[in-house]
Amino acid sequence: MVACLSSKVLLVGGGGREDAIARQITASGAELFSALKNRNPSIIARSREYLIVDELDYPAIANFAVSRGVDLVFIGPDPVLDTPLADSLMEKGIKVASPSRRAAKIETSKAYMRDLMDRYRIQGNIESHLVSGHDELEKLILNGTEEYAVKPIGLTGGKGVKVMGIQLSGRPEAYEYAREILSRDGQVLLEERISGEEFSQMVFTDGTHVIPMPLAQDFKRAYEGDQGPNTGGMGSITDRDHQLPFVDSQTREKSLSILSSILGAMRTEGTPFVGVMYGQFMATREGPKVVEINARFADPEGINVLSIMDGDFAELIFSMAEGNLRNTVNFRKMATVLKYIVPPGYGTNPAPGTLEIDSGLETDKLMLYYAAVSGTMNRVNMSGSRALALVGLAESICQASDIVEAALPKIHGNYYVRHDIGSREMMEKKIRRP
């Protein structure tokens, strides 16, 4: 079934990423149905019908999809992928342009991802230790010489990973954090600490074929200068040529080859992956190394690429779900900078309030996306998470950053934003870095 004007698409999720997806679905002429936990005014305004629901309540969402006769479902948030929703929908004859629960393990189990890469000898893997005993933990951290990234096995919303020498100041602190995870989860993953510039490579895939999206880089640290605790992401950048000024074309090609190898391994395992695969890589002197593999659009980086996407998005996701991926989209040659507006204290102790938004803020060079908020298009109540995403589009990253900065006075209330993302000073430091 090729998407047509009468196609009904159900979108699960109510954040900024899902707002960007919703706009692409409706721009393609499909009818949007949505299931979300917050009353996101932008998604609701575009929906023919919507269901306010706990997004992990997969039976309620599946029943909504069946009762409304939707043709296809697209899942945004990663925790939803770790429920039986996708499998339940497919069993009911509804197409899903997102991975099955088993395929989503490439994200929901970091140990599975490392083991798969190891067994199939896929390039870009790094040394890792899946630790299930306190004696081994003590040997590796307290009595060892290597530095590690300490990771829970499952989903943490980008906030659970801590790195020795960065968030963890010494071996005793690293041991205590790893021991806390081990005591709670029964296992903890220690990964070799690597250094370089991180970048995100997302692709659309039907399990075999891929359509690459522009490279992106996100900024997880809460404070200016990449300081403070990790968050879900404070902002992100893409460049006009769909590369990044600090990632060469060979590194990008190798990262795409790694993703194709992972997809091939998953097919061989009998777990084909359908949907958006998002590789988080580190550009090192030895080539790109895999930090994580994710099973959905990145947030915020997915918003950047969706902001410059042209073409029939609905037809694209239908072709993914049907195993016959067709390239019906392209990406404009524009740089983008996204900066998230968040409640003060986000990342540690958020203090949500109300934001007032001037009418007419959006232009052809500035997009405003609504994230974890409820309310109206001009007045929103923040939750403890990210509230609004401002995206500037320009000829250069620095110009796009300036466009966002110029729009901030049109949003009123007590909020925090990282002004340095995409700034001239930041980009000059990245380009000069050896």
Image: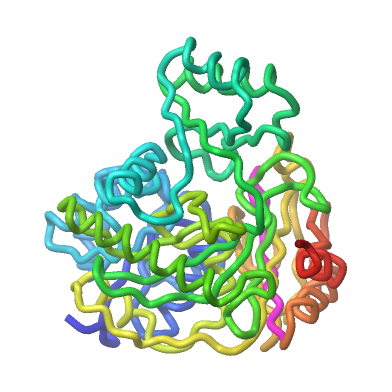
Residue 429 coordinates in the image, percent (x, y): 82, 64
Query: Residue 357 at what x, y percent from top left?
Result: 75, 68
> Is residue 182 rendered to the left or right of residue 205?
right
Which x, y percent locates residue 13?
A: 44, 56
Q: Is residue 410 visible?
A: no
Q: Is residue 88 left or right of residue 150?
A: left
> Residue pushed farthest top?
135
**Quadrant location of the N terminus in the rendered image:** bottom left
Query: In the image, residue 400 lies at what x, y percent?
Result: 75, 79
Residue at left offset 55%, top offset 77%: 249
Q: At 52% across and 60% down in the image, what residue appears? A: 288
Residue 66 is drawn in which quadrant?
A: bottom left
Q: Which residues are magenta?
A: 381-394
Return the residue nearer the eye: 314 or 275.
275
Q: Quadrant of residue 48?
A: bottom left
* Residue 145 falls in image quadrant: top right
| Residue situated in front as seen by the camera: 219 or 252 | 252
Total marks drawn?
Answer: 0
